Image: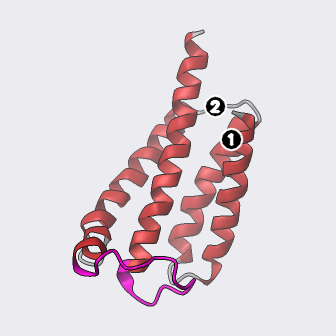
Amino acid sequence: MKAFNLFCFILFVFSAALQYNDPDPYLWMPIYLYGAVLCFLAFRGRYYPKAYLAGIAVYSVYAIFLLFDKTGVFNWWNEHNAENLVQSMKATKPWIEETREFGGLLILIIALSVNFFAYRKQART
């Protein structure tokens, strides 16, 4: 678990730093840094299950919004034939940006879920 959390911490800090040039860094930097802090604390052996659940809940609600938004994931899939998301680093179309954001939220949800269930397993033993 230490290696997983160290990797996620570095990934989320790097992702937050990349948001500096994003159109909405005030939203995405805190989203990634919240996950980074929780992964760093888990790396240090400190688990906060309520914070994991809060993050999972907020990230899930936002991910569902991005899934159904008019320029979201379903729009990208149905209207734009799942156009390549990584053809360029610059997201020139809104459905590309929102689908990438959806992917980032999924990664955060997975990381926090892994830590939540690791904590529960540790608490039972």
- Tell me, for residue 47, which label it has, or none: 2
| Image color mode | secondary structure
Asked if residue 124 is positioned above or below residue 95 in the image, the reply reads above
18 lies above or below 15: below
Q: What residue type is labelled 2?
A: Tyr
The kind of residue on which mark 1 rests is: Phe
Q: Name the outermost residue toward the bottom.
A: 92
Q: Residue at the spot x=57%, y=83% of the render?
A: 89
Residue that appears at 45% across and 43% down = 54
Quadrant containing the N terminus in the rendered view: top right
Q: What residue lies at 59% left-to-right and 53% top-to-bottom?
A: 34
Q: What element carries label 1?
A: helix
Please check the rendered image and state whether residue 59 is part of the magenta-colored stretch, yes or no: no
Q: Position of residue 83 (x, y in %)?
A: 37, 79
Left or right of 88 in this view: 41: right
Q: Which mark is residue 4?
A: 1
Whichever of labels 1 and 2 marks the residue nearer the N terminus, that label is: 1
Q: Is residue 7 found left or right of 49 in the rendered image?
A: right
Give the magenta-colored segment's residue range. 79-95
At which x and y percent is residue 52? Answer: 52, 39
Q: Distance between the residues labelled 1 and 2?
A: 14 Å
In the rendered view, does 7 fall on the left or right side of 25?
A: right
Q: Residues within 10 Å of mark 1 (few under 14, many from 20)?
A: some
Residue 41 at what x, y percent from top left? 71, 39
- The residue drawn where x is 31% and y is 72% is 72
Q: Residues within 10 Å of mark 2 (few under 14, many from 20)?
A: some
Nearest the eye: 23 or 14: 14
